[in-house]
Amino acid sequence: MEQVSVKGGLAELQRSPTPSRAKILAVDDQPARLLSYEAILGDLAVEVVRALSGREALAQLLKHDFAAILLDVSMPEMDGFELARVIRAHPRLERTPIVFITGVHVSDLDQLKGYEAGAIDYISIPVVPEILRSKVAILVELYQRRRELQAVNEALQQARSQLESEQTQAPVQRAARMRAVFEHPALFTLILEAERDAAGNIIDWVYRDANANALALTGATRESLLGRRVSETVPDRAQRLSAVCRSVLSQGEPTIYESSLEGHEFSITVYPIAADAVVSTALDITERKRAEMALRQSEERFRELANSIDQFAWTCDSAGRVSWYNQRWYDYTGTTSQEMLGEGWKSVHHPAHVDRVVEHLERCLAAGKEWEDTYPLRGRDGRYRWFLSRAVPIRDEHGRVQRWFGTNTDVTDSRQLQLALEQADRRKNEFLAMLAHELRNPLTPICNAAAALLQLIPPDASQQRLLAGMVRRQGSQLARLIDDLLDVARITQGRIDLKIERVSILSCIEAAIEMVEPLVREKQHQLIVTQSLKPLHVSGDRVRLVQCVANLLINAAKYTNPEGEIRVRHYEEASQAVIEVTDTGVGISAELLPQIFDLFVQGDQALDRSQGGLGVGLAICKQLIEMHQGSIEARSEGVGHGATFVVRLPLARAAREPSPGTDDSGGCARRVLVVDDNRDAADSLAVLLRLEGHEAAVAYSGESALEVLAHADPDFVLLDIGLPGMDGYEVGRRMRSAGARACIIALTGYGQQEDRQRSADAGFAAHLVKPVDIDVLKALLSAG
């Protein structure tokens, strides 16, 4: 704000001290509502003065000048309409903006009554904080602009008085000062003089002076404008302007109004300077109007968007105090804005979660970080639903958090679906384990019998050996498929434990080739192995690494036509051991290549499923290799061009090779007791042991096994865990209680890690999974 002073005969502009904060008068007979208005307007540079009645409000109005009045309609003694009329009747207060705030008088008739009483706006309860703040901000801006204009007008009036008083002494200086004020850089100023007829009636207005801003706006020169009538220059505005000027002259008081010209918005002040002359000053408020319009449009868009989305939406200040909710929040919770004031939102949170939610929220607020949490909220029906809640900070140009915007998304259905999927997955894994157990029971005697037959059939009985070998190979294939199914369950649950040791890559390849040799020989493939120039070792689980290489070889054999070629080579590259398996088979299409390691994906999707398998081998291989901190990739130039699988594993640190030892496993005969309620499985395994030169006895129940143990002294007991009645764990406990010296080995169809751990905890010396690997059993008997 600027005012003019006279010193040394020259006009100077002196800046006045910064004005005090604008005051807002809030009138309501409910103290809580007054406090809420004060909290909502806390971010604005305003001072909220409270009044609990019309009398208190009038007392404050007589003492202070207010930028706006927030007035409740329903009050005892003197209601809002009556108070507004009293305020408007006072000359000093007739232009003070009045905004009615009410929750009851909201009809069109009520609003019309409020506007007739002098209100400029009407806000319904519950109050939307952003709307109230924006409206008050605009009124404060208008008030400050009005004060600036008033100050300018007062300065002009003062200058005029000073100039008139000094006219006889310093006419030149007086004119200069007047011109300095007249040429105010922010104002468009005109001086108009009344033109009267013979009867003394004003018939028009004539331009007597105009500052540079006004001339530039009209596009006229001083010579072409001065002396002309208003009706000639702006005929479309002449009637209104003439009426305003006549009113100012007759009342002797300034008038302020708004008008548009040349695409600009102006706040115009007209005041008298002589008996027949007025000054019209205009302040360009175009940018402010645009800002007000943009703010209104932004508020409308925000409200429409916030009320149309499926989520709950809310805002809070930098300290976390919620200031607004969208309508969906109230529809769901059945609460009101008054109930949600302060920490009212806690009332709809589940008691078991609210402390945790608040603690997490406070940490994010303090750090200025995005917040996310999931918790239940109570609906109006009393039932809780789960919501995923997020809040992001909204910062100013300096990066300071001004407020937060948050949403709550209903995730009850997806959460229930997730729980159902997890339960179904558990049931699937349990089913796979049970299926494997049930499949191994009939598979065990088949494999045992096939192995025994191969030893009994003479070398020259080629057909019989062919059939027995076929049975053994297919039984081994079925056992491998069962193991793959169980490995899928173990890997997806993260339940595979690796037994890490220093492993030779060449030994893994050789063991894998031995496993797949029957399949390679059957399809007459040419298998070419290229060894590294130096031994390569990795830190890993030898059994699992052999399984991986075997899966790659089996995959190559399945998808390579008879008499095709399979190449295996290993080498060192960038401190890694690399294993490559390349075939001349059907290849992999470009569409399938990115999915080749996914579960249940196969290259051949024909209905006849001529290649067999479950489509899990490569997926298992990838998971196991990654558990060894390695990687695997597939390459193919397309269908018909074969495929290459490349495995990379970190090399182990160099270590001295152990000194070669002697194999003292010998062919020592053992006394073995086989206990299994599956008679075929027990009998076939006993026959196989006898063919190996051991003494074998059979028991088909736990009770009979204890009876055999009472008059026999076996070296080993192969004990089925799943015996009916008295299970294997109980039988083993009783055998040890009876002082048996035999090495008790668990024999079962369950081969998961927890099954092995349970048998070890129960005191079993080893854990064999049906069908029994004869080589493993022979090694156990020899080592015992």
Image (tube, rainbow, N blue to C red):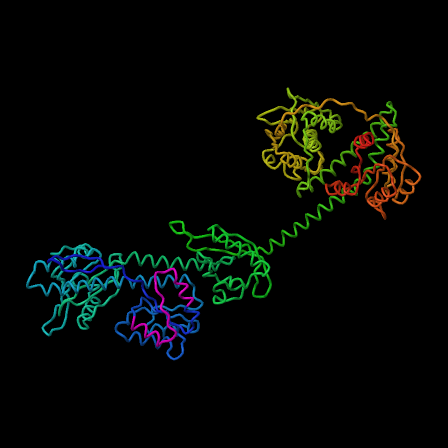
Magenta stretch containing residue 515, yes or no? no
Q: What's the magenta region?
A: 35-63
Q: Position of residue 314 (x, y in %)?
A: 48, 58
Outermost left residue: 168
Check the image and report above or below for 80 versus 768. Answer: below
Dominant SS in magenta: helix
Q: Residue visible at 28% across and 72% down? A: 94
Check the image and report above or below for 415 versus 52. Answer: above
Q: Position of residue 521 (x, y in %)?
A: 75, 25
Q: Residue visible at 43% across and 64% down? A: 128
Q: Position of residue 60 (x, y in %)?
A: 32, 72
The one nearer the camera, 499 or 627, is: 499
Magenta stretch containing residue 54, yes or no? yes
For residue 509, which quarter of the picture? top right
Check the image and report above or below for 76 versus 40. Answer: below
Outermost top residue: 533
For residue 126, which quarter of the picture? bottom left
Q: Is residue 242 left or right of residue 469?
A: left
Quadrant in which the C terminus is drawn: top right
